[in-house]
Amino acid sequence: QVHVVESGGGSVQAGGWLKLSCVATGSTGSRNAMAWFRQAPGKGREGVVCLNSFGSKIYEDSVNGRFIVSKGNAENSLTLEMYQLKPDDSAIYYCALGRVCDKWGRVTEAGMDYWGKGTQVTVSA
């Protein structure tokens, strides 16, 4: 069984920053692609950033230049530093683990097998 746990969400004013962390534990097998997704109220879940199995980082345009993804110190761990936050960044942020998190230069959830429960990020104007 695999458990994915996110931490670090919170509330911040526009222009501020937050750092999210994620760790996956258990029988992860050969899965080593990790990604962040988010879902705002009334909207579908969207990709944010992928750290694929080759170590490449794929950012969606909406966060490119503002967000930074890094491998954590522990195996199957991930951090997301979010800067210059905007109210549109408000959402529940989910971390996921799988074998593939990108396709044609975009973040995809199709290859993600395990998901965390999410952490809330709220950015006020």
Image (spheres, helix red, strand yellow):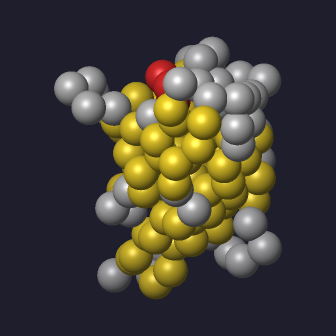
Q: Position of residue 63 (x, y in %)?
A: 64, 25
Q: Tell me how many marks there are.
A: 0
Task: In this rendered view, identify the residue nearer to me: 124 or 71.
Answer: 124
- 20 with respect to 110 (left or right): right
Q: Identify which residue is drawn at 46% across, 41% down.
A: 122
In this view, the residue farthest toward the left is: 42
Residue shown at the point (26%, 32%) measured from the top left: 41
**Whole-percent x, y for residue 15 in the image:** 70, 29
Q: Is residue 6 above or below residue 113?
A: below
Tell me: residue 104, above or below residue 33: above
Task: Evaluate whether residue 100 shows in this view.
Answer: no
- Residue at 52% x, 48% y: name it: 11
Q: Write the residue at 62% across / 29% down.
A: 14
- Residue 122 placement, left or right of 79: left
User: Which residue occupies the foreground of this view, 66 or 33?
Assistant: 66
In the rendered image, residue 80, in percent from the top left (x then y), is placed at 67, 49
The quarter of the rendered structure image containing the N terminus is bottom left
Residue 34 appearing in the image: yes
Quarter location, residue 66: top right
Q: Is residue 13 above or below residue 104?
A: below
In depth, the one of 96 and 94 nearer the eye is 94
